[in-house]
Image: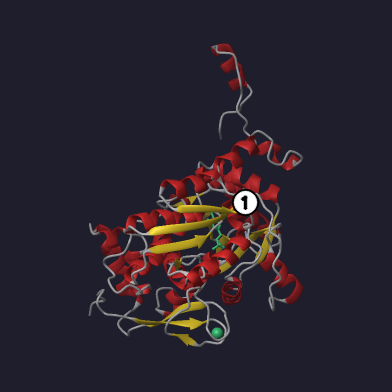
Amino acid sequence: MSVSAKSATSFALRCIQCQAECEQPSPDFRCAACRNLLQVVYQWPEALRGQQLRKLWLERRLSPIPADQSGVWRFRELLPILSRPLDPVTLREGNTPIYDLPRCAQAAGMRHLLAKHQGMNPTGSFKDTGMTAAISLARERGFQWVACASTGNTSASMAAYAARAGMGSLVLIPEGKIAWGKLAQSLEYGAVTCQLRTDFDGCVRVLSEVVQRLPIYLVNSVNPFRVEGQKTIALEMMEQLNWEVPDHVIVPGGNLANSSALGKAFLEMRELGLISRLPRISIIQAEGANPLVRSLRENQGRELQPVQAETLATAIRIGNPASWKKALAVLRATEGACIDVSEGEMAVAKAEIGSDGIGCEPASAATLAGLKRLVRDGFVGPEDRVVLILTGHMLKDPEYTLLFHRGELLAEYAEAQPSRRPPVLLDANADSVLRVLETHRQPA
Ligand SMILES: *Cc1c(COP(=O)(O)O)cnc(C)c1O
Ligand SMILES: [Zn+2]
């Protein structure tokens, strides 16, 4: 009995609130009856079972065809959303490493610590794993234009995949408060890039009107197919961990789609017998952009009060997260924690990750900052197996890093001092260089 790509699994789009099925989604991917988000649901064939899938996915790693070399489409049995599954728009996304972080483990009071580095994707963030799915669908459905509102990484990714597919792309980003690396990518890959005089949440509002008025395919994370691509982060993680489920997976929360995708993946893996238990999935927000944390604190998650978001971690500078209900369901299903961390904690955590030789962007470092708190609170034990999701690459936002090490990012934050490694300006002679070395300990 073989599980071939041809054994079609049927899927439907279903409202997460009223459960209505949606044949023809509206341009903004919301339920026609109650305006909540949709999710992809499957009727898995009987033949689709754990052991065979594991073997099949492993074998594909030796294959030369692009769909098999993609760390997303290699797992296509769990996201059977394309009519032509062997012909996706792919940049060979996914395939990201898991590293151990010994210095960070020590800083957090843990015995071991692992990080899956999504910054190692083609455009430098996990957004690529979802974008390959959204753009492939847009092409199958005959769209010539795609669009997104973005804090930066979604637009960088969309611009690249749209270029690969020969489609036009429209980016709406907030004026200012966007990391240079991300803006540069959007320009380089040829997106029509509009900086609007508003914040991310304002860009979302404008875009929802634009897609009602023109046939443009929306690839914001309300697009349920992006979530399907992002699920593969968890599938690949489990393969790398030899299918031994970690105790905790920790992820930053902005628009809350990535946490939703991870949760959906683990639930589906359990349903298909690929794993037998769930990790706790915990979500870390920035103190200045913490609407989900507040909602849980103030009304047990019954409603979400949007906040005016403010944080230097621009990727999670979101006050009205679209996927909050999906993320809340994941927190409940996996009994994860949802907490916020300060700007200083994130900045120090980022430099600590750096001292393990791994560069990530500020939002990604929220995971380590959050872990430290969860260890202090006893929610995570020192022996637990923990995987942090590092969502983006350090070179997205080099300005933040430079300002931090020069002491200009959070000038008054004394706890950051030991983590700072500012450049030294010297006269051009060996003596002055050697004097500097004398003041530095040998690395451990
Ligand atoms: C998009 C993004 C996030 C936030 O993910 P959500 O799915 O919006 O919660 C975090 N970090 C980076 C680097 C991102 O690009
Ligand atoms: Zn509904």
Relative horizontal placement of residue 227, taking residue 345 as reference (left or right): left
The picture places residue 142, in percent across and down from the top left corner, at: 33, 70
Residue 245: x %, y % from top left = 48, 67
Crowding at dot 1, Cα within 10 Å, few <14 / some 14-19 / many 20+, comes out as many
Point 61% across, 69% down: residue: 336
Quadrant where the image shows the C terminus: top right
Look at the image and tell me whether residue 91 can be seen: no
Q: Is 25 drawn above or below residue 20 in the view shown?
A: above
Residue in the picture at 54% in, 47% down: 102
In this rendering, the answer to whether 46 lies above or below 4 is below
Could you tell me residue 232's position as x and y percent? 41, 65
Secondary element under disc 1, as helix, strand or loop, is loop
Q: Quadrant of ligand 1?
A: bottom right
Q: Which residue is mark 1?
A: 313
Task: Residue 371 in the image: state x and y as whole percent.
Answer: 63, 57
The answer to whether residue 263 is above or below residue 308 is below
Most foreground residue, 242 or 89: 89
Task: From the viewer's side, name the closer residue of 333 and 7.
Answer: 7
Ligand 1 is within 8 Å of the C-beta of the residue at disc 1: yes
The quadrant of the picture occupied by the N terminus is: bottom left
For residue 36, say whether it is visible: yes
